[in-house]
Image (cartoon, rainbow, N blue to C red):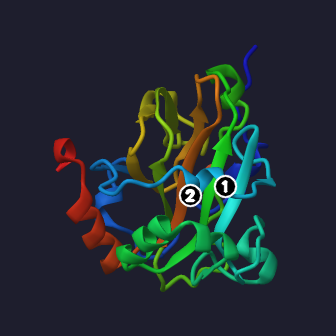
Amino acid sequence: MSFWPNREHWSVQIPLHTSHRRLDVLEPTGVVELAPMPVEVPASEWETLEYMDWKSGGDTNFAPLASADGELDCRGFWDKGKTDKDALWTVNAERTPTIRAYVDAVGANFGRVRIIKLEPQDRETAIRSIHRDDNNRFNPDDEGWVVRSWVELTDNPDSYMLLMDNDADGLPDPTTERRVPLHRGARFVVDTQRLWHVVVHNGTAPRYALITSFESGPALESWIHANRHPAHV
Ligand SMILES: [Fe+2]
């Protein structure tokens, strides 16, 4: 019998409905695909970084580019009593000028900025790690809902981010499954506190991606509209 989350899964306890400001563009499905990455990110910006052992969504390692206090730390901001916003660049960002400029240019308040390194995992293995994120702990109710954006750095067209919305019991609903392909330069924004998610990585080498937390608000909204995938406008 393959693994499937039940009501005891820790993700079920993470708030789903709150009064935070959300973006209309994410309301229908919780995900929006963007046009391919418009700038070339040199491989040195992810290959020369030091990765820290931090397991999330499989056999993963992370290189923090921006963190709660600018230290090289993978922990949630809440360990420092801070919501996942107002991040400070770490020393790693000195080696990633293209990525730093890209994130700054969005113009939205950002939290954690990290490169994820994910070892290959087939679908059955990946499902064991399907989860929802706790992106909005300590986030005041009258501020913007924190969501996440991805930029795929390596080319893995046979891999995909598996997304599922919730059923009536707050468990992943297979009828809502979506697969976002992870070719190089693929970009998307996901409400990862709402959607269950995990990456199925069918490659033979690690997959690298940029993950950034952004606060929902006018700046993020106009950036998404300016960058939406042509097929989804
Ligand atoms: Fe996650």
Q: Quadrant of residue 87?
A: bottom right
Task: Write the residue at 75% across / 76% down.
Answer: 78
Number of on-image labels: 2
Q: Pointer 1 and pointer 2: residues touching (CB < 8 Å)?
A: yes
> Between 13 and 22, which is closer to the camera in this rendering?
22
Q: Quadrant of residue 41?
A: bottom left
Q: Decide if residue 193 is in sight here.
A: no
How crowded pointer 2 is (Cα within 10 Å; few <14, some 14-19, many 20+) is rated as some
- Percent across and percent down for residue 232 are 21, 45
Image position of 112 with respect to 187: above or below: below
Q: Which residue carries the number 2 mark?
A: 45
* Label drawn at residue 178: none
How crowded pointer 1 is (Cα within 10 Å; few <14, some 14-19, many 20+) is rated as few
Left or right position of 231 against 201 = left
Q: Which residue carries the number 1 mark?
A: 48
Task: Write the residue at 53% across / 43% down.
Answer: 166
- Percent across and percent down for residue 117 are 66, 45
Q: Secondary structure at mark 1?
A: loop
- Percent across and percent down for residue 99 are 48, 65
Q: Secondary structure at mark 2?
A: helix
Q: Amino acid at mark 2?
A: Glu
Task: Write the residue at 25% across / 59% down.
Answer: 227
Q: Decide if residue 129 is in sight here.
A: yes
- Separation of residues labelled 1 and 2 (CA atoms): 6 Å
> Between 62 and 172, which is closer to the camera in this rendering?
62
